[in-house]
Image (cartoon, rainbow, N blue to C red):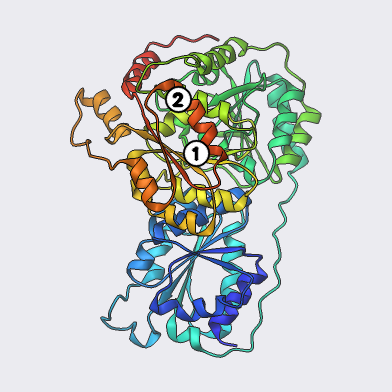
Amino acid sequence: MNAAELLVRCLENEGVEYVFGIPGEENIDIMDALLGSSVKFITTRHEQGAAFMADVYGRLTGKAGVCLSTLGPGATNLITGVADANMDRAPVVAIAGQGATTRMHKESHQILDLVQLFQPITKYAAQVRSADIVAEVVRKAFKVAQTEKPGCCFIDFPENVAEEQTTKRPISVQTPFTPLPADFKMEQAARLISDAACPVILAGNGVFRQRASGALVRFAETLNISVANTFMAKGVIPSAHALALGSLGLKARDLPWFAFEKADVVICVGYDMVEYHPEQWNPAGDKTIIHIDALPAEVDECYTVASGVLGDISAALAGIAALASPHQGRPFEALRDAIVAERELFANDDAFPVKPQKILWDLRQALGPDDIVISDVGAHKMWTARLYPAERPNTCIISNGFASMGIGVPGALAAKLAYPDRKVVTVTGDAGFMMNSQEIETALRIGTPFVILIWNDAEYGLITWHQLRQFGRPSHIAFNNPDFVKYAESFGAKGYRVECTADLGPILRDALQQNTVSIIDCPVDYAENMKLTARLNSLTSPV
């Protein structure tokens, strides 16, 4: 077989279900080899969309998502999605065709040094220089991509190497074992927790990666300690749970922040500071920090660890819970009551355009606990992170490491492929939607129905929010939108327009029943952004 055929056999060996991408001249050998493969190729309309699909697929399944491009502009179009996956800790393997090695030593059409280009934004980047090393490069890429902390790996595949013959075969898959934490470290952490006056838990996305949500809830219940989560860990404890304090992630002092102001011990479980810097919740650097994760903590003056418990998170939580003394009372009960009350405050609001709080209330009522929301990036992301109650792990996906706009539509497509029996909604702004709306055609072609809920304000609303806070006036943020209903219909999708607030709930329920892509144009009242800023600035502690 040739090297391209071996590459495809290696993908099959890794259990790859889908490859997202666009064919090109320099990857045609791979495309031909895929014709007889069990791996399904999803032809996308842009390489960035392909990379975002691999990103969300990898994050939801824990298995590396795969995206493919040709050389030059095809490869550079992958970069944003690759960087997003790498910083959001999603396992991805990105593959790009490349010109022949016989022309890489000189100026040549579309030739870039792709390994050098991708190295800073991946965990591993390599060029395949011989057909005989294909199996090793592919196996290493998948192993590194899926090992803590997960991320993206990149393979550069020259066209002349793809044609070379080889007798090599795929290498058997071996999954690295996460070691058990050291007993003395669990004992040390248990003593700190037992002696704490007011501990609190900060749970991050690493809990999802180790499938440790259940263990976290049992730990919190056993020791009677409240839990706040980062944006990317929504659902790590059910929002309805009495110990759940909601999401921590705004730079402003939001309600969950007051739990950290009062706490003397912070138990960080699977926490990635790339999401939310510790100087936001530990500005004086005076908290006693317990770090429970697979890997050591990043060095930071506001994150000096008193006890680092490294290894399997579930085992660590169970071991510490068995040794520590449970805490009494509910010091954050009033705080939780305030958080819950805020979610319900606009349940019956009928003002139009629709307030962000009302949109999220109606969305929650329309979805089941296992259904999936994919948030694009913009002002709506902040509202979703604060107010959308997630009851299950990985049911509210927020990009918050790299935080790239445009992830919503391709991400929803990937979520529907990963979980075809669940309803999927992407919450997106009008700006983020238009960045990758071309993937609506991809979704319709492959039969992946989902709902696109557009928060329409005809400007870059999050930037407006920042500008108003800093300068008191907006600058160059307005734009015009197409008629989103007609735009939907031009693809063959279903289009809805919310013309009064009372229509939103029924429209959502109807759209979720459609066996197609449905697009909802919902005017949003972003005057609530500055009202929220004013309210947060005047907040006093309910603790």
Q: Quadrant of the C terminus?
A: top right
Labels 2 & 1 near each other (Cβ < 8 A): no
In this view, the residue in front, 427 or 384, is: 427
**Compared with residue 428, is residue 258 higher up or lower down, i.e. above or below?**
above
Q: What element carries label 1?
A: loop
Rendered location of residue 22, percent (x, y): 43, 67
Q: Whole-Å distance between the Cαs marked 2 and 1?
A: 40 Å
Amino acid type, residue under disc 2 in the picture: Asp
Describe residue 467's horizontal placement relative to residue 232 as left or right: left
Residue beneath the point at 55% across and 15% down: 262
Q: Quadrant of the N terminus?
A: bottom right
**Compared with residue 17, is residue 193 higher up or lower down, i.e. above or below?**
above
The numbered disc on residue 503 is 2
**Compared with residue 79, is residue 197 higher up or lower down, i.e. above or below?**
above
Rendered location of residue 104, percent (x, y): 34, 82
The numbered disc on residue 273 is 1
Which of the 4 image quarters holds residue 393?
top right
Q: Is residue 230 shown to the viewer in this render?
A: no
Describe residue 320's horizontal placement relative to residue 50 as left or right: right
Residue beneath the point at 49% across and 18% down: 255
Which of the 4 image quarters holds residue 378?
top left
Q: Earlier in the sequence, mark 2 or mark 1?
A: 1
Rendered location of residue 323, percent (x, y): 80, 29
The numbered disc on residue 150 is none
In this view, the residue in front, 104 or 178, is: 104
Q: Is residue 112 shown to the viewer in this render?
A: yes
Hey, which residue is sitting farthest right in the picture?
A: 322
Amino acid type, residue under disc 1 in the picture: Met
In this view, the residue in front, 233 or 199, is: 233
